[in-house]
Image (cartoon, rainbow, N blue to C red):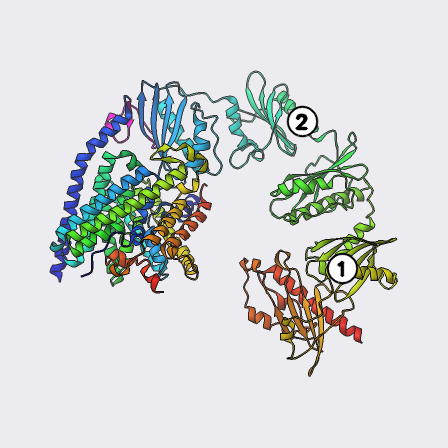
Amino acid sequence: MKEMILLVLGFVLVNNYALSAYLGLTPMLGFAKRGEKLLALGLSVTAVTLLSSLILWLLRGLIPAALQVLCAVTVILILVYVLQLLCGKKLGIWFPVIALNSAALGLGLNLLKADSFLTVLLSALGVGLGFLLGLFLLSGVQTKLEEDQAPKAFRGLPLQILAAAIVAMALTAFQFK
Amino acid sequence: MKNNLTRTILALVLLLAVMAGATLGVNAITAPIVEANRKALLGDSVVLFDRADPAAAQLTVTADTVQSVLRDDGKQAYTLHLSTFEGYTKDKPIELTLVVDFEGRIVSLSVDSSGETRELSEDFLPGFTGQDSTLAGVQLVAGVTFSSTAIKNAVNDGFNTLIDNGLFAAAEKSAEQLLRELLPTVYPALVSGSGAIQGEEVEGSGSLKSGYQASTGDGYAWFVNDGSADYLGIWTLAEGAKLYDTEGNSVDNAALLEEVESWSLACRKALLGDAVALFDRNDASVESELEIHGETVQSIYKNDTDQVYTLHLSTNQGYTKDTPIELTLVVDYEGKIVSVSVDRSGETKELDEGFLPSFAGQDSTLAGVELVAGVTFSSTAIKNAVNDGFDALITNGLVAGAQKSEEQLLQELVPIAYPGIVNKAGAIQGEELAGSGSATAGYAAMNGSGCLWFVDSGEKLLAVYTHVGGVTLYNSLGEVVTESADPALIEEIRTLSIEAIGERDTEAPKAVLRLLPEGAEPVALEIPGLTSCVVNAWTVESEEGSLYAFHMRPYGYANEVMDLYLVLDESGAIVGQRTKELILHSEYFSDYTLDEAAYKEGLIGLTADSYTGEQTLITGATMSSDAMESAVHAAFEAFWLLTENRG
Amino acid sequence: MKERKLLFQNPVTLLFLGAAPALAASADVRAALGMSIAVMAVLLCSALVLGLVRRLLPKEALLPAAVIVVAGFASMAQLLLEALLPTAFQMLGIYVAVLAVDLMVFGAAEDAADFGMSKGLLSALEDGFCFAVFVLALSALRELFGTASFAGAPVEFLKPFRMGLLSSAPGGLILFSLLLALFNKFFPAREEAGRNTSAAVAFPVEEKEEEA
């Protein structure tokens, strides 16, 4: 039990995919700024990451190594379309955010070698929650940044990424267990 | 529409097929190159086992961690690729390359990819070089326990693979290594959570080759060899001697047990000196006739050679309540402290450098011991513990209590005589002033309310001067002696004080004027008596009768001064208030919840009778809250003093 | 129909969209070089293929088609890199594969799908060039000052000035942000020629900022 919790927490805090491996960083930064429906976005990303990782892991024996990326992308694409059908409306600009999220792909590929179903499940959960945590942290920072008069060249992205760097540094406090 | 969807899907599937085909095509070209690269990297080694190519296996491999085993006859070594998922991150394996020579000694161990390489590659991995299959010299690294355990286990798997296949013989673990591995189970108190021994190394004697001593001297672990076999000997104060063989079985060897016990006792005696236990909370064998109150005193030992008492004290009042501070106090027969040392404490640096040495030479009054800023909690706790220790010695008639000097008595009087100069913890908040004339030394209060002097005019006195209350004198018994004192002395103190801290500013500040009716001209008031933090007072006649305005400056968070103005009407009810900074900025970050406007509004209308202290409570901002409470109290007190005085 | 964009038209948006591969490749100059080549190749090939097939596909199939095409080329780039530049491949790990879902790549791919092959190819060239310049600069700084080496070879005189932080993830982000600010200063975004790809729609970066 302790190991399982550690595994999830590890991905949320220590190995946050966006902040320590840069995977999913772009959507995180892009959306933290908008500050809208973060929870829904984070949960959709979590769901797609979870399902795609599981499907890929189950299919792992059937896929030739060279075609892993293509298969992973296809699985994710189909999943997002299904999500769209289930929601009953166009995902619009959310489509690329969820479908083209490198966290989902990266994890799917990393986990091909994982040893058990449970590991895959918990890792994917952790990565998704880590994405959500990053979204919330950065959108909090973003609200504060908007009130400040930064030098012009720093406004917008550079400052946002700097903030992400500081959040990432804060998370290193959880490292090395 | 339906047609369109089918067409879309068909087109996409087709595209997918084309891309997949192209990728496979590229793969067909690159695969041989990749393979050739890999071969080139291997050099002239022979593949004994490769998980990717099970057909070529010449070894039986059971461990999942072993990926491949190569033999390099040129270098006379085996190269193993290991991969473990037991590290901290489960998604990426830790990949290791282990090189072992034909003799079974590790040539090198390196990590190919891992999230946490720095500590590992700098401290941990080099420790493997030169080890044999027992890995006796490899110690886990704190901070990266997960990974270092994972790596150690993987290396073990690698060795087992080589040994199981008869490539070389397993190295025997030395008896000492086996016994060492027993320690955590048979004597857990001596071993920390990470498996490191927490104790001092001590020399053995006879069959006892070497050993460890728990820091308190309450237990010992010995590596024993009686010429025929190796044993682990344990002796603890509570349970006596025990003996274990390398398998971990208890051994009943009376001679050796006796030897362990006697040498442990000898070591303990060497540690404690030839002290006699007068009292020991942890040692049931000591029959104590002493009367000990409280929980602080753990033990008292009497040492006639050095003419000292040694006390072990333990207090929970330090900053961290969960780990007690353990002290050793040595007092000579005259009742003077020889030394105070801290055995275990989280915050030792400040304590060790200035605070603990200041105890040396003190008597039971501890007059020369000053609390240390920054570690107030711990230094107070230690001082109290030492006090408890002295109490125990004095009540049992072991040493005589020293008389407190007059200076010390006056010092202790300060919080009562002049509450405006001390903070809530009783520490003086003021700037030191040089004495002159009868005054030997003094302090100017940080909140500007006045100053304090230690006076020596034949009799030792404490003089308090405040802007609103004038001079008050106390003797060392705490009695007010202003009336009977020499008027010249009072005048001297007044002049000296004004010289030191300036004249009173009688003009009412804007903050006060805004609270009073327009055009009011407040008159400065003197308050007959002392209040804790009223620094100024005014009165004004208005249509509704007299109004009293008070300016309070209590010590808030981090002993910063806060400003509060209150206006009271004739009946003593608050009719106006103003605070410059209700919660000092530094405490903003604490977890308080407060509706400031409502809070301030809540003060209006309060009188000394209806004020319970709860109205000024700020949940979560304790320091500010306390300061507000004392300030409001002070205002009511000042009002009472004023009106009582008028009749 | 909008104007074709200019060189360094909006490098900040571009690099933001390509943040993951840029940062992942920036710890070592060799990795950066490998990644730059891979990015350029994937960009050009995807633009070429999408330019060719765009008329054959229904409009709503363009985005998934782009995903599939880019993923295919990313896989091929990964295979080729493993064969030809094994050192860089080892350092980059899965990040070349992650190009398959990189929004920057989609910018050029969608340009090709929307406006035809020639414009798509031009976009690809520019984006690839801009990416390479940035990533090489970033990696040179990170490697020189983070590990006191260049392309794997130790640089002795920088040893005393080593800042371990730079080789960590947060350090990469900090340097990334500083370089972006520098780009912002010298190549400020030109609004009139903003992109209309789904990536740019999803992540409008600093255009909105100016209005506020």
Task: Indicate the quadrant where residue B422 lies.
Answer: bottom right
Q: Is residue B150 left or right of residue B22?
A: right
Residue on which the image places disc 2: B267
Dot 2 alpha-carbon crowd within 10 angstroms: few under 14, some 14 to 19, many 20 or more: some
Using the image, tell me which numbered label, if any, was put on residue C35: none
Outermost residue, bottom direction?
Answer: B543
Quadrant of the image containing the C terminus of chain B: bottom right
Task: Indicate the quadrant where residue B86 lies.
Answer: top left
Residues at marks 2 and 1 on the same chain? yes
The disc, 2 or 1, on the residue closer to the chain's N-terminal end is 2
Instruction: Give the residue type at disc 2.
Output: Cys
Asked whether B66 or B618 is in front, the reply is: B618
In percent of the image, x 42 and y 43: which residue is there?
Answer: A3
Asked whether C3 or B231 is in front, the reply is: C3
Can the viewer see residue B580? yes
Dot 1 alpha-carbon crowd within 10 angstroms: few under 14, some 14 to 19, many 20 or more: few
In percent of the image, x 56 and y 60: which residue is there?
Answer: B585
Residue on which the image places disc 1: B499
Q: Chain of mark 1?
A: B
Find the distance from the CA under tag 2 to the CA under tag 1: 65 Å
For residue B586, above or below residue B367: below
Q: Chain of mark 2?
A: B
| Magenta span | B45-66
Label 1 residue SS: helix
* Residue B46 within the segment the image draws in magenta: yes
Q: Is residue B49 left or right of residue B370?
A: left
Instruction: Give the residue type at disc 1.
Output: Glu
Image coordinates of residue B295 in percent, x first then y, are: 70, 45
Q: Is residue B412 left or right of residue B239?
A: right
Image coordinates of residue B561 in percent, x first then y, are: 64, 60
Label 2 residue SS: helix
Task: Indicate the quadrant where residue B523 lies.
Answer: bottom right
